Amino acid sequence: MTDEKLLQRASRGDESAFLSLYERHRAPVFRFAYRMLGSVELAEDVTQDCFLGLIKNPNGFDPARAALRTYLYAAARNLACKHFRHPASDAARSLKVEDLSEDLRTEAREEPLGLLLDAELSFEVSKAVGRLPPLQREAIVLFEYEELSLQEIAAIVGADTGTVKSRLFRARAALRKSLAPYLKSEAEIEKFKKVYK
Amino acid sequence: MNKKRDYLRLVLRREGARSSARAEAHATTRDEVPGDEELSALLASWRAPRAPSRTLDARLALAFREQTQARLPLWRRLFLTKIAVPVPAFAAAVLVLICAVSASVILRLRDVQTQSAPQAGVSTKLVAERVEVPIERVVERIVYVEREQQQRRVRRRNETRTSSQTAQTPQTVSHAAQSVGATATTVEGNEQRKRLEDSRATTMAGFKPAAEVKLRIIKGEQFER
């Protein structure tokens, strides 16, 4: 069933339709909110508000203009911007180590040292992304993590593709600067790998 | 059925065309930005939680129910509304209810026992007997007699008596002594009558006004004479 039909049924009070719609889109919306705000609690709040807002005003979504996921990203982005304007958001922006849940570190390395290094690297990257201005952050998050096209990002942030492109370049430059030690070490590791092969 | 199938095929084709167009656009626009693999690999090390917690799912379902219930009409909301009652409060309410019901049952049983219990030393025997009760009808009637008529009657009687006495005196000379005695008795009789009349005459002596007056209206035709 398409998103539009599910939304129609959900707006009429069909809970199962609403839940299936939520199941379909909750993960990307939550991930985006998490990367924007750096806190699981805030990301969950944003996700909830996003879906409830969709049910409250189902006419706000126009399928002719964009896909439902794009609409949800835009809603999450607006809600995240509200958090940035709030004074308490500074505390929320700094990512806590406790927020790094177990499933963040399970894949790469199984050894304790490896897990620790992964967690540290993840924390540093999140800090570097968190230090970016919100407009650059949303561009890099949507492009690098959510793998959206420039057009989709432009539709979400309400800007033209050229602006998004320039924000991306600036964000990359800032990240290269802040993550320089890790980039070098990564390069060195690669070199060592090649040498020892 | 065929029409429906054709329609579905058309929709699927359209969707397919749209998605392929989207994928192409996606690829071209992403190609516009030169790739930075090194940075991308480093950024990929920041892994976000895959999905929100299950508590959010429950929270959201609850919020959805509340929101949709707010739109429902009042009668339907009344049927669907749920009230959260703490377990101790519910248990206390149930306990009170049980106590009240059992107390009322016990009281009723006691009443029944006291009513049905036989008195000490008296042997009772239930006998069904039909008793016919005579019904009397008491009718009260007040009889009014006109006072003038009564007085006329009394006068007539007196007149007839006096006329008879006067008629007797000239005829019976021989019985003069008897007649003298008779006249004496008639004089006495007259005096008695006068007294009676005096006593019957209405005087206001000893009259006391009544505290209340009860009026009874009786039709003139119903007078019994």
Image: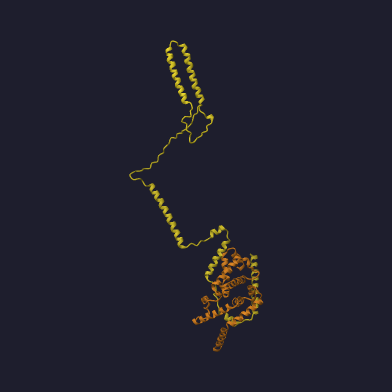
Question: Which residue ends up furthest to the bottom in the rendered image?
Answer: A195
Question: Who is closer to the viewer here, B6 or A178?
Answer: A178
Question: Which residue ends up furthest to the front in the rendered image?
Answer: B205
User: How far from the left and from the top, in percent, is residue B9?
Assistant: 64, 69
Q: Up-down: is B22 above or below A56?
A: below
The answer to whether one can see residue A2 in this image is: no
- Classify residue A160 by image quadrant: bottom right
Tell me which residue sits at (54%, 58%) in the image: B78
**Quadrant for the N terminus of chain A in the image:** bottom right
Tell me which residue sits at (55%, 65%) in the image: B63
**Quadrant for the C terminus of chain A in the image:** bottom right
The figure's colour scheme reads by chain
Tell me which residue sits at (44%, 57%) in the image: B96
Question: Who is closer to the viewer here, B164 or B198?
Answer: B198
Q: Up-down: is B91 above or below A27?
A: above
Is B93 left, or right, of A129 in this rendering? left
Question: Who is closer to the viewer here, A179 or B61?
Answer: A179
User: How far from the left and from the top, in percent, is residue A16?
Assistant: 56, 66
Letter of the chain shown yellow in the rendering: B
User: How far from the left and from the top, in percent, is residue A102?
Assistant: 51, 76
The answer to whether one can see residue B74 in this image is: yes
Question: Who is closer to the viewer here, B218 or B176?
Answer: B176
Question: Which residue ends up furthest to the left in the rendered image?
Answer: B121
Q: How many marks?
A: 0
Letter of the chain shown orange in the rendering: A
User: How far from the left and from the top, in percent, is residue A67?
Assistant: 63, 71
